Structure formats: C-alpha cells, structure tokens
Amino acid sequence: VSHAESNPSLLLHAEGTNASTVILDSALPSHTLAISGSACVSTDQFKFGNASLALDGASSVNITSNDSDFNFGSNDFTAECFIRMSGLPAQGSAYCIFSKGPDLNNNYNLYITNISGIYYLGFTVNSSSNAIITGVGEISPSVDTWYHIAISRNGSNWGIYFNGSAVTTITDTD
C-alpha cells in the first residue's frame, strides 16, 4: 500500500528462508505483522528475488499496528501487488486479496470473485453495512500465472487494474 511510489507505507518483499514465518516490512517506518494459519515464505514460486509470500486462502498476514497509514480517508492512494493463484475461486465464491477494517460492516476489500463462471476483480468500501463504493470488472485469470493488481484513487476517481489495464473506473459522488 502506498501513498506515493517513493514513500510506500507497506513493502513486503517476502524474502527469506523457505517456510519461514518471519515476513518483514521494508517500508520506513515499518509495521508489525502477525502471521496466521500456514502463511509463510516460499522459494517454490517468486516474481522478484528468491521467494514470495505463500497464502492458502485460509491463512493471512495481518498488520497489527493500528496505523493511520491505512486509513485512507479522502487522500489519494495506490495499493498494488502481484498474485499467483494455484486455483481459481469456485462459482459463487471469492478470494480476498486484501481487506482492512474493524469489522465486517466497516471495511474495504479487494477481491477476485466467480459469478456464474465469469471472474471479476472487485473493490468494495463498506460503511455501517452499506456498500458506499463498489466496482467490479471482468478478468480472465489462469492458474499458475503472475498478475499485477492495483487499485487507486485520485480525488473522486477510482480505478481497478489487472496487468496494467483498467477493468473498471468509479466516480465517488459522495
């Protein structure tokens, strides 16, 4: 997650020894991370360096500091990552790429979902159980392929990107 490319708020290279559960934040200042489930460093697949972060859909890496860096408010921001899936979401289900919020009613989520066999990259901002921003765009993912995924906000304009191409844009009218 970054407010500017030169000043990232979170930078996870996931370098290290295979199966290590130590995931370091290379951003300054760094954030404390908590590992749950089987999340770990994997040297089996990597986009950069010699390792990547392996998540199995039930495991996660959580930022344990309650830091204002991730409360975007009305600020411009870009959040991006590379993902590689060993399987795709089953029909009617979704894979969460990242989520932030104190509870299920007040949060934001970036996800890939399967609706009737069609895959979508989506982003939702929820406030008091109401989706105040929702955008989805159709994508054609394959297993065992690296993809660059990003979401950005510039003023009231939002964009969701899949391998550098906008899959949807949203204008926040609130």
Image (cartoon, rainbow, N blue to C red):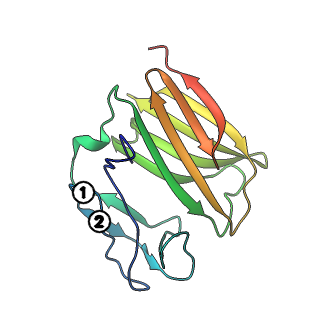
Q: Residue 60: horizontal and vertical position, in percent? A: 41, 63
Q: Nearer the viewer, residue 83 or 5?
A: 5
- Amino acid type shown at disc 1: Thr
At a point 54% along the width and 38% down the height, the residue shown is 123
**Residue at label 1?**
64
As drawn, the residue found furthest toward the bottom would be 18
Q: Is residue 92 above or below residue 16?
A: above
**Quarter of the rendering containing residue 103:** top left
CA neighbours of label 1 inside 10 A, class few (<14), some (14 to 19), many (20+)? few
**Secondary element at tag 1:** loop
Q: Rounded to the nearest whole Å, what is the CA distance between mark 2 and mark 1? A: 6 Å
- Amino acid type shown at disc 2: Ala
Specify which label sits upstream in the sequence, 2 or 1.
2
Q: Is residue 145 above or below residue 96?
A: below
At a point 31% along the width and 76% down the height, the residue shown is 22
Q: Pointer 2 and pointer 1: residues touching (CB < 8 Å)?
A: yes
- Residue 91 vs residue 1: left or right? right
**Secondary element at tag 2:** strand
**Label for residue 34?**
2
